[in-house]
Image (spheres, rainbow, N blue to C red):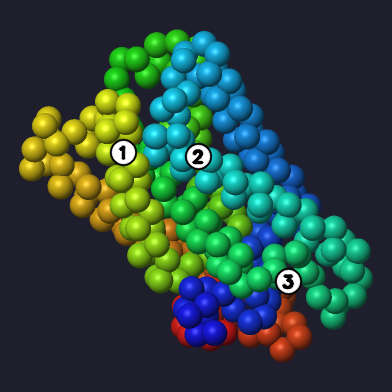
Amino acid sequence: MRVYASLGVQTPFDPTCSLVTSHVFSPGTLAAIRTALAVYSLTALIVNIVLQSVELDTIDSFFSYFTNLSYIGLCSYMWAASIQTIAYARHSRRFHTQSSARYEYPLQKWPRFLQFLHLLLWSTVTTFPFIVTVVYWVLLASSSTFQTRYSSWNNITVHAMNSGFALFEVLFTRAGPMPWTHVPFLIVLLGGYVGVAYITHATQGFYTYSFLDPKKQGAMLAAYIVGIAAGAVVVFSIVWCITWVRNRIWRRSELEKYGPRDGASDEVPMRETYHGKA
């Protein structure tokens, strides 16, 4: 279907296995790094949920914060990516002596809708963490940011290390650039969160972020909302350019290692889709 092709879902899907390989690391090393990031992010979420349930009594609002929702998305992606990369690493190790072997991983065989969701999830985890980091340290950080050991660790984890995880995906994997058709989905997700924020105010009586309070911000509220949406487009564009340049720099070694095979194009998979090939 042309719709799926425009969203980055090729047929065959990811023929050069760009989602599970790196220009720098071996498949096994990439799998280990992604697994470590997945374990850390899940541990951070569990610690936060337990502490906010037992000690801080703030768990009722945990899922109302975009920071937490985006971190859950980041954790989910790291687990999904690590599992796929482990499967690819095992498969490639098994067939490394066969030059014509197809190095496969499970996602390549899954329904196209799930393939699209994986690609869109990559777009979110390489866009939203940077927005969270910038908005927090520019608009929201205060003297309480490092007031306690827990707050220091938590704020570094979800407001700084999150961008580090995203930057790793941008710089050290072969994924991306994703098609521009993902941008409307990012805007819709951000718009959906604004709805969550106002539902939270209606049901729990507070604004998750002070800049969303229309009484305090007045006309600036619209500027903040539009500015964050525009920021998402800017971040997506920067990530797109970085991944495009990254793939160009490593193109020769990439073709020697990963393709073309089985009649697949020698283009970088996500660029291939962007130019309408599928």
**How many numbered discs, if any?**
3
Q: In this view, does 228 lie above or below 152?
A: below
Q: Distance between the residues labelled 3 and 1?
A: 39 Å
**Residue that protrudes farthest toward the bottom in the picture:** 263
SS type, badge 2: helix
Q: Mark 2 points at which residue?
A: 71
Q: Is residue 61 above or below residue 101?
A: above
Q: Which amino acid does label 3 sit on?
A: Lys
Residue 199 — which label? 1
Mark 2 Cα-neighbour bin, 10 Å: few <14, some 14–19, many ≥20: many
Tell me where residue 140 sits by quadrant.
Answer: top left
Q: What residue type is labelled 2?
A: Tyr
Q: Residue at x 72, y 89 (%)?
A: 263
Along the horizontal axis of the image, is 213 left or right of 182? Answer: left
Q: How far apart are marks 3 and 2 (CA)?
A: 28 Å
Tell me where residue 232 sits by quadrant.
Answer: bottom left
Q: Is residue 81 above or below residue 176?
A: above
Q: Which amino acid does label 1 sit on?
A: Ile
SS type, badge 1: helix
Nearer the observer: mark 2 or 1; the answer is 1
Q: Nearer the viewer, residue 186 or 155?
A: 186
